[in-house]
Amino acid sequence: MKRKVTKAIFPVAGLGTRFLPATKSIPKEIMTLVDRPLIQYAIDEARAAGIKEFIFVTSRGKGALEDYFDHANELEATLKRAKKTSLLKTLQATNMDSGAIAYIRQHKALGLGHAVWCARRLIGDEPFAVILTDDVIAAEKPCLKQMVEAYAETGGNMVAAMEVPPAKASAYGVLDIGEDMRSIVKVKGMVEKPKPEEAPSNLAVIGRYILTPAVMENLNRMKAGAGGEIQLTDAIAQEITKSNNVYGYRFRGQRFDCGSKAGFLQATVAFGLARPELHDEFAEFLGEMTQIRKAAE
Ligand code: UTP
């Protein structure tokens, strides 16, 4: 029987250099889309998928991230006294159970694969999810939930996948597709950031994974790969040869790369427009901006 996926690793130890100077003092994961930090979107998605244990791989300077998960007792009491029920609900929805969160330190930013490996003792002999908070996905059914359902059929290792324009494939891990079963594809190869002429397809890996303990074992022996970093992709790719059980999952939803400035701004517009209380005013403003731009051209 396949074991349920109840643990998720959130690697948040990166330096976030693309958002300097903001990330000098604010962890990237605390930056807000509308009114919620990126990390909250990731936590909500994990909870919806049945995750019960949340493991953060952090680094120096991420204190604000840990504080974010403290219960804000005084603030809750003030809102209660002022009968601000809706705000109180919003705040309480961010509370996590005692013992549900663990923090592990990555002492040096040696790559995503290394960050995941840092959590090995907390994972033990279980399948686990990995969520990259940079990738925010707007979807009717949360992306990780879609994957957990697909995983119940396939087992093995599963990576979220998305078609990208061929010219952009070299910015991602790219899948070499074996059998194509529409939403699920059997993977026969994986390359991290291939040269444009060497990309095996335009199906790119994005930041959601369900992995077996075997991948953790592979990480034990992993050497630095592309960019001098220990790559998660390489450790997953080893399972193609070893056990032939790696799948790509074409999720339904729109992914925003909130690790880049342009992606973050696009997400802000999309999530802002999706809020009923903001929609009209914001849409009107965007309409005006478009007209002004057109007139200037
Ligand atoms: P990125 O490649 O986006 O790196 O990492 P970064 O440091 O966050 O951002 P830039 O490129 O300097 O702007 C992808 C994910 O992997 C985590 C990051 O926190 C991010 O969630 N990561 C990366 C680690 O936890 N440790 C690492 O050594 C590298």
Image (cartoon, grey):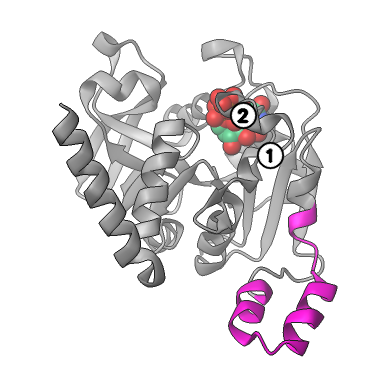
227, above or below 134, in the image: above
Magenta stretch? 67-92
Q: Quadrant of residue 25?
A: top right
The three-letter amino acid code for the residue at tag 1 is: Pro
Local packing at callout 1 (Cα closer than 10 Å; few below 14, some 14-19, many 20+) is many
Q: Which residue is mark 1?
A: 27
- Judged left or right of residue 271, residue 283 is left
Q: Residue at x 66, y 27 (%)?
A: 15
Q: Residue 123, image x and y in percent?
A: 70, 49
Mark 2 or mark 1, earlier in chain: 2
The three-letter amino acid code for the residue at tag 2 is: Gly
Task: State yes or no: residue 163 in magenta.
Answer: no
Task: State yes or no: residue 91 in magenta.
Answer: yes
Ligand 1: give its quadrant: top right
Q: Secondary structure at mark 2?
A: loop
Q: Quadrant of residue 4?
A: bottom right
291, above or below 86, in the image: above
Distance Cα–Cα, label 2 vs label 1? 8 Å
275, above or below 119, in the image: below
Q: Residue furthest right?
A: 74
Q: Residue at x 60, y 52 (%)?
A: 39
198, above or below 213, in the image: above
Q: Which residue is mark 2?
A: 16
Q: Residue at x 84, y 74 (%)?
A: 74
Q: Residue 105, image x and y in percent?
A: 80, 37
